[in-house]
Image: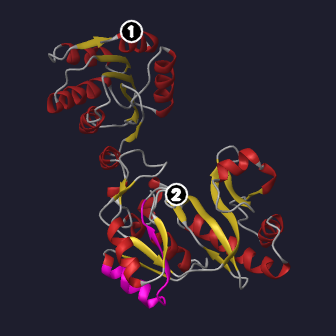
Amino acid sequence: MKVHEYQAKELFRKYGVPVPEGAVAASPKEAADHVRAMGGRAVIKAQVHAGGRGKAGGVKVVSSPEEGEKYAAGLIGSRLVTHQTGPEGVPVDRVLVEELIDIARELYVSVIVEPSLRMPVMIASAAGGMDIEEVAAKTPEKIVQIAIDPVIGFQPYMGRKAARGLGLPQELVRPAGALFANLFRLFEGLDCTLAEVNPLAITADNRLLAADAKLAFDDDALRRHPELAELRDDRQEDPLDVEANRADVNYIRLDGEVGCMVNGAGLAMATLDLIGQMGSQPANFLDVGGGASEEQISRAFTIMLADPKVKKVLINIFGGILRCDVAARGIVAGAREKGIDLPLVVRMRGTNAEEGRRILAESGLRVVIADNLQDAAQKVVQAV
């Protein structure tokens, strides 16, 4: 789950990560009032779950309340298109009005979970304001990485190491170390998957401020943080992702034409790979899990078919905890609710597979039964 910049900065404040003074506005008049309260000059930022706002016209320095009101009026209620949103863009419902800060240097710092190390890693770079992927590709020597064993946590020497790696002057080493420690404390305490500051600004008067803030949280941990779940903005997410989250199934929309419904993430990845090898592309990753109910299968099926790019469907079920007959009844229910006139290929193995195939055969649906995964992939790719 992602949150807006203004929400992330409120959490930064609570955890002792310094941020500029700012206020959120839901109307042009509010934006003008905030600019006036900040002395007549401020920076206004569109609040969306996407990067690249500046290049897309979503960030601007304004020099009067009137200019702020006019700019906010053009943003609020519009859809901002950036390189991360696709051509449809995302809605702008609020703007963040912040004090202007005199930036002398821009740095980068983040905490992520590194799967290869199985622990959190702090990443710091002197090349702030840039995409960290670009820095890693072109100037990897500018990146400092510090693995943090969750058993011992973030230690003071780690903060000093990161500060020295950024080339900070001696008077900023201690404040930077405290900032890094607090950023990790937030990351760990709120079950984040990402805590990023880009840029981390060194101001002309030698302060460290998080000029931007990005947080993402582990969905599976939100039950421990009900106050965070309330920060979710469904309008910033793909509607099908929202429906899948409510149905408690794992769904990711992709760019192909073959809709895929599978039980088990590993089996799903193998299915997607095989479809690609056969010359087509998957339209989604959809894992209903090992213990899905008939209702969940039905809802997952309708979610998959709601994507207009889906031109054919492959269902790959290996019955275990999820019995094949339960999956079959869910598929039939979903197909009847949504209506389907697309090629439908089904491969079922495991518990009650024969019963599942019988239910599908007697459903009246035009179903092609496949013997194995390769056979299923071939049949769905060749289907017209």
Q: Quadrant of residue 292?
A: top left
Q: Is residue 333 magenta?
A: no
Which residue does the image show at 44% across and 74% down from the upper left? 96
How dense is the environment of label 2, judged by Cα within 10 Å: few (below 14), some, or many (20 and up)? few
Q: Quadrant of the C terminus?
A: top left
Compared to residue 331, the image places residue 252 above or below, namely below
Q: Secondary structure at mark 1?
A: loop
Q: Which residue is mark 2?
A: 55
Whichever of callouts 2 and 1 sits on the residue coming sooner in the sequence is 2
Compared to residue 293, the image places residue 341 above or below, namely above
Q: Quadrant of residue 184?
A: bottom right
Q: Quadrant of residue 170?
A: bottom right
Compared to residue 48, the image places residue 26 above or below, namely below
- Looking at this view, is 175 or 57 the one in front? 57
Compared to residue 98, the image places residue 118 above or below, namely above
Q: What span is colored magenta in the figure?
A: 29-48
Q: Quadrant of the N terminus?
A: bottom left
Q: Which residue is mark 1?
A: 371
- Looking at this view, is 157 or 20 the one in front? 20
The picture places residue 186, in percent across and down from the top left corner, at 58, 69
Amino acid residing under circle 1: Asp
Question: Would residue 31 appear left or right of 279 to someone viewing this image?
Answer: left
Q: Secondary structure at mark 2?
A: loop
Asked if the residue under mark 1 is in contact with the one under mark 2, i.e. CB atoms within 8 Å, the reply is: no
Which residue does the image show at 58% across and 62% down from the upper left? 195
Amino acid residing under circle 2: Lys
The picture places residue 215, in percent across and down from the top left corner, at 52, 62
Judged by depth in the image, the label closer to the viewer, 2 or 1, is: 2
Question: Would residue 142 appear left or right of 45 to someone viewing this image?
Answer: right
Question: Would residue 184 appear left or right of 27 to someone viewing this image?
Answer: right
Q: Is residue 46 magenta?
A: yes
